[in-house]
Image: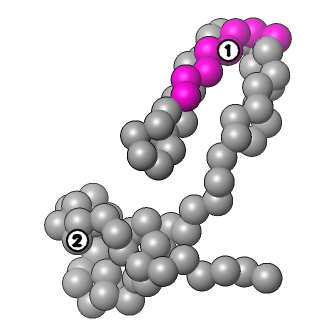
């Protein structure tokens, strides 16, 4: 993901597997590249405790049951 900062300051922290994280500091005039992997929202929601998903997204168990815990590969 490429970002161009035209004013102000920003701090971005990217969290990865196994508790790894990297923090990037930017200021006006910086161009930043933030490396990331694609994630499956479907898989992420399926692996999140259902109580949290229901509380924050206001959806029911029937919809949560349709989420797949396996990431689908798009070719």
Q: Which residue is mark 2?
A: 50
- In the drawing, does residue 42 fall left or right of residue 5? left
Q: Looking at the picture, does residue 73 appear above or below residue 39?
A: below
Q: Quadrant of the N terminus?
A: top right
Q: Within 10 Å of the Cα at label 2, are there few (<14), some (14-19), or many (20+) other Cα atoms? A: some
Q: Within 10 Å of the Cα at label 1, are there few (<14), some (14-19), or many (20+) other Cα atoms? A: some
Q: Is residue 25 magenta?
A: yes
Across and down, in percent, residue 46 comes to 36, 74
Q: Looking at the picture, does residue 8 appear above or below residue 14?
A: above
At x 81% / y 22%, what residue is drawn?
A: 31
Q: Separation of disc 1 and disc 2 at Cα?
A: 36 Å
Q: What secondary structure is found at the residue carrying circle 1?
A: strand
- In the drawing, does residue 47 fall left or right of residue 39? left
At x 31% / y 87%, what residue is drawn?
A: 65
At x 31% / y 65%, what residue is drawn?
A: 48
At x 46% / y 73%, what residue is drawn?
A: 43
Question: Residue 26 — which label?
Answer: 1
Across and down, in percent, residue 56 comes to 27, 59
Q: Is residue 43 magenta?
A: no
Across and down, in percent, residue 6 comes to 78, 16
Sequence-wise first label, 1 or 2: 1
Q: What secondary structure is found at the residue carrying circle 2?
A: helix
- In the drawing, does residue 61 fall left or right of residue 15? left
Residue with the most extreme front position: 18
Question: Residue 1 — which label?
Answer: none
CB atoms of marks 1 and 2 within 8 Å: no
- In the drawing, does residue 28 fall left or right of residue 11? right
Magenta residues? Answer: 22-29
Between residues 5 and 32, which one lies in front from this camera angle? 32
Q: Looking at the picture, does residue 16 appear above or below residue 38?
A: above
Tell me the quarter of the picture where residue 69 sits: bottom left
């Amino acid at each position: 993901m490429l970002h161009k900062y035209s004013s102000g300051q920003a701090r971005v922290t990217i969290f990865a597997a196994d508790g790894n994280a990297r923090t990037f500091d930017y200021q006006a005039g910086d161009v930043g590249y933030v490396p990331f992997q694609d994630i499956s929202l479907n898989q992420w929601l399926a692996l999140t405790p259902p109580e949290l998903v229901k509380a924050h997204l206001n959806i029911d168990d029937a919809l949560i049951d349709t989420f797949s815990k396996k990431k689908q590969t798009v070719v």
